[in-house]
Image (cartoon, rainbow, N blue to C red):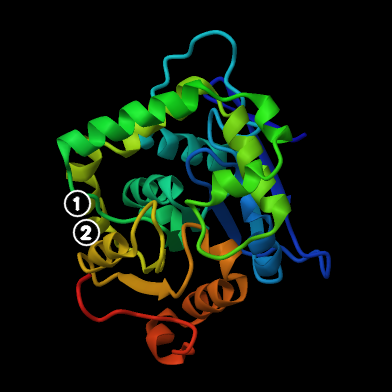
Amino acid sequence: MPLINVRGVNHYYEWIRSSADNQQKPVMVFVHGWGGSARYWHSTAIALSEEYDCLLYDLRGFGRSSLPTEKTNLSYDLEEYAEDLIILLNTLEIDRVYLHAHSMGSSIATLFINRYSDRVHQAVLACNGIFEYDKRAFAAFHKFGSYVVKFRYNWFLQVPFADRMFMARFLSRPIQKSDRFAFLEDFLLANYEAALGTIYTSVSKQAVDIMPKEFAQIKIHTLMVSGEKDQIIPAKMGKQASQLNPQLEYQEILNTGHFPMLEAEETYLEIVKSFLAEPSKLNNTQNRNLINVKQEIL
């Protein structure tokens, strides 16, 4: 298992490259969301590996990037995760990349772009956007989230249909059982402190105050993709974020939830490939029967 030390934490990473030739290609880095790992990016990376050398890694405390038993001085601020990424790239001697991120990973990618814009060609941010602060709702979410993180048991993997029950809120369309099971397994194995800490930093008043400014400051051409029926980060939040900055393209995929890259793989890849090839022409080249781009503010 390939590991690389980033600020005292061994980070899992892997390359997905096309076996068709040995020619070096531009690097695309994938950043996963809360509770998951790089595993759910596999099919997307394989599909893009003809044009890119795809670098997948697990965020600190998630997946196979286990925290050391002794305490570290690192926080779970999303800015710290952006710093983890730059150290990872420097250690691997990678200069510029294409960023491809999802959910909480898209927040990390946004922070990374604004601190290291010279290191990024283009970016794709899936299932992210602007939250409105509601003190009572946020407090209830944090309380519920702390219970969910605290009471995790590996035997849940043996419960019939547990993967379906767990993923029901995340999805609008069915996905492969292997993907459902992998996400449930990653969630159960995530480090307690990392899982809880990132709940508090990603869904917080500070994030509500900071992220609109971060979206507005992006200087590279960036695609934002939302699932029409996403219950975790509703599509209207992504639409609102994209309107803050002319550098941000917005696409919304019909009848998909929080994992459009798995729920509507072909449509998702069509959008991404078109953006990366000719981003300025994206809105004129898509099949309107598959993609719903809402003109009004939702």
Query: In what element is the residue under mark 1?
Result: helix
Q: Is residue 281 left or right of residue 180?
A: left
Is 97 above or below relative to 33? Answer: below
Is 109 above or below relative to 149? Answer: below
x and y, in percent, of residue 175 in the image = 64, 60
Say which quarter of the image contains residue 108: top left
Say which quarter of the image contains residue 57: top right
In the picture of the structure, the residue carrying the numbered disc 2 is 216
x and y, in percent, of residue 291 in the image = 44, 81
Task: Please identify the residue farthest to the right as the structure is shown.
Answer: 20
Classify mark 1: residues with Cα within 10 Å, few (<14), some (14-19) or many (20+): few
Classify mark 2: residues with Cα within 10 Å, few (<14), some (14-19) or many (20+): some
x and y, in percent, of residue 184 in the image = 62, 40
Query: In what element is the residue under mark 2?
Result: helix
Is 150 above or below relative to 164? Answer: above
The answer, for residue 76, to whether it is visible in the render is no
Circles 2 and 1 in contact, beta carbons < 8 Å: yes
Residue at image location 68% in from the left, 44% down from the top: 182
* Type of amino acid under label 2: Ala
Residue at image location 66% in from the left, 31% down from the top: 156
Q: How many marks?
A: 2
Say which quarter of the image contains residue 3: top right
In the image, which disc is placed on residue 213? 1
x and y, in percent, of residue 91 in the image = 59, 37
Residue at image location 20% in from the left, 64% down from the top: 244
In the image, which disc is placed on residue 126? none
The answer, for residue 47, to whether it is visible in the render is yes
Is 125 above or below relative to 153? Answer: below
